[in-house]
Image (cartoon, rainbow, N blue to C red):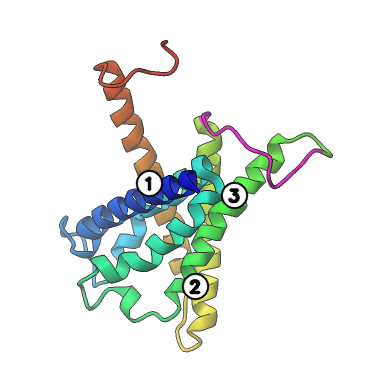
Amino acid sequence: MKHFIKVSLTVYIFYMFLYCLWYVLSVIDFANIRIDNAWAGSLCYIPHGARVLMVCFFRYYSLPALYLAEVSGPYLINSNEDYMMEYINGWQYGSIGCIAAVVIAVELVKWSRVTEGNFSFFKPVNFKNYKFVILVVFISSLLSGVLCNAILALVNTSETIDVLTVVRFMVGDLLGAITVIIAMWIVFTTAIDTRMIISPDHK
């Protein structure tokens, strides 16, 4: 229980930090890149990086906090009345699709790494190898764009979600997650080089 609480706090704070950063840069349009209010922020959705990293490293312990952050983020942070979450019904269900996409991606990677006959949904996978994390990013981005928009289309029967919207979400999740991973790699590499932290490889 103590471990679950620690993981939940870590996941929630990390996701909300990235969500706040994304909101400031995108929705408030700090960089002045908005084009006709066309959801420009979805082109680089950095909170997807939190979904991927938290599920990869904390497994299913992270899911409740991830969903709580997905749902509470827009209510706590958003102030722009034109932001899509305020007029697209069912985005809470769409968030389930986004998280499910990461879980499915992780399970597919696990499946590909287990010999025939030994597959288990509960078998742990070592994601210290960045190649498997990147693979999860690619798979989850593709699935997230499809699942999230499919759910939103089902809930909002009067709204039309075209192929370009799905592709934009796929690209946005992919670029967002890659951006987070690169940023964290730079931060931790710099910290190790300056001996602010000690690499586990150098004991």
- Label 2 sits on a secondary structure element that is helix
The residue positioned 22% from the left and 78% from the top of the image is: 81
Crowding near the residue tagged with mark 3, few <14, some 14–19, many ≥20 C-alpha atoms within 10 Å:
many
Q: Check residue 93 in the rendering and tell me which mark sits there, or answer none.
A: 2
User: For the residues carrying marks 3 and 1, which lies nearer the camera in this image?
Assistant: 1
Q: Pointers 1 and 2 in contact (CB under 8 A)?
A: no
The amino acid at mark 1 is: Thr
Disc 1 designates what residue? 10
Tell me: residue 167, above or below residue 113. Answer: below
What residue type is disc 3 on? Ala
**Magenta residue span:** 118-129
Q: Main secondary structure of the magenta part?
A: loop
* Mark 3, residue position: 105
Q: Residue at x 24, y 17 (%)?
A: 194
The residue depicted at 54 percent of the width and 34 percent of the height is: 127
For the residue labelled by badge 3, is the local secondary structure a helix, a strand or a loop?
helix
Residue at the far top in the pictured view: 203
Earlier in the chain: of badge 2 and badge 3, it is: 2
Along the polypeptide, which appears first: circle 3 or circle 1?
1
Q: Is the residue marked by circle 1 packed among few (<14), some (14-19), or many (20+) residues within 10 Å?
A: some
Q: Nearer the viewer, residue 64 or 92?
A: 64
> In the picture shown, does residue 32 fall above or below 188?
below
Q: How far apart in space, not on screen, are marks 3 and 1 (Cα)?
A: 22 Å
Q: Quadrant of the C terminus?
A: top left
In the displayed structure, does residue 194 sit left or right of residue 57?
A: left
Q: CA distance from mark 1 to mark 2?
A: 23 Å
